[in-house]
Image (tube, rainbow, N blue to C red):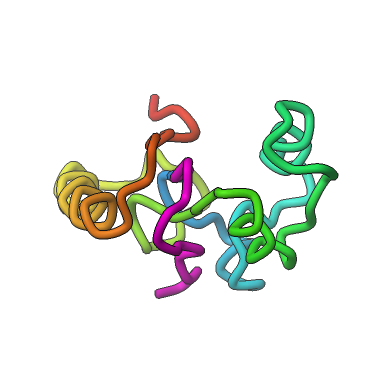
């Protein structure tokens, strides 16, 4: 995987991005762009006790949070993903959720 999943059994929430961006590809960390709002949002919503950095993504497990991508292929924009990639990603997500059994699955982002 370009950006490894952050997953473990017994987590409360599985957050799912569409796919890694180019910065995430370079760093091998989820939501690695400096402008990413995920880390501030997780803190502001009370999921984490502080704003984590992408390199600290494994600490999400301490707070009951998993993190993955629907599609592994990095692109500058999620609208570059094909329907076939999204369908395959949905099947992979179904298997991942069945295995790790999070209480909630949250899809992050919007496709045009």
The residue at 74%/43% (across/down) is: 48
Direction from residue 22 to residue 57 in the image, left or right = right
Direction from residue 103 to residue 28 in the image, left or right = right
Horizontal and vertical percent for residue 87?
16, 45
The residue at 24%/52% (across/down) is: 89
**Does residue 104 lie above or below 53 as drawn?**
above
Horizontal and vertical percent for residue 31?
63, 52
Horizontal and vertical percent for residue 9?
40, 61
For the record, the magenta segment spans 1-15
Dividing the image into 4 quarters, which one contains the N terminus?
bottom left
The residue at 44%/55% (across/down) is: 68
Task: Give the quadrant of residue 92.
Answer: bottom left
Residue 7 lies in the magenta-colored region: yes
Direction from residue 111 to residue 92 in the image, left or right = left
Residue 88 lies in the magenta-colored region: no
Dividing the image into 4 quarters, which one contains the C terminus?
top left
**Does residue 2 lie above or below 43 as drawn?**
below
Nearer to the camera, 91 or 79: 91
**Does residue 1 lie above or below 18 as drawn?**
below
Horizontal and vertical percent for residue 14?
44, 45
The residue at 62%/66% (across/down) is: 29
Secondary structure predominantly adopted by residues drawn in magenta: loop
């Amino acid at each position: 995987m370009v950006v490894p999943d952050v997953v473990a059994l017994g987590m409360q929430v599985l957050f799912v991005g569409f796919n890694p961006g180019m910065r995430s590809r370079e760093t091998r960390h989820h939501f690695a762009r400096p402008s990413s709002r995920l880390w501030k949002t997780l803190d502001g919503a009370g999921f984490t006790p502080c704003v984590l950095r992408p390199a600290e993504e494994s600490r999400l497990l301490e707070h009951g949070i998993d993190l993955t991508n629907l599609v592994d292929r990095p692109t500058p924009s999620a609208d570059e993903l094909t329907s076939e990639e999204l369908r395959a990603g949905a099947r992979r997500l179904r298997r991942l959720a069945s295995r790790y059994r999070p209480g909630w699955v949250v899809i992050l982002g919007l496709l045009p």
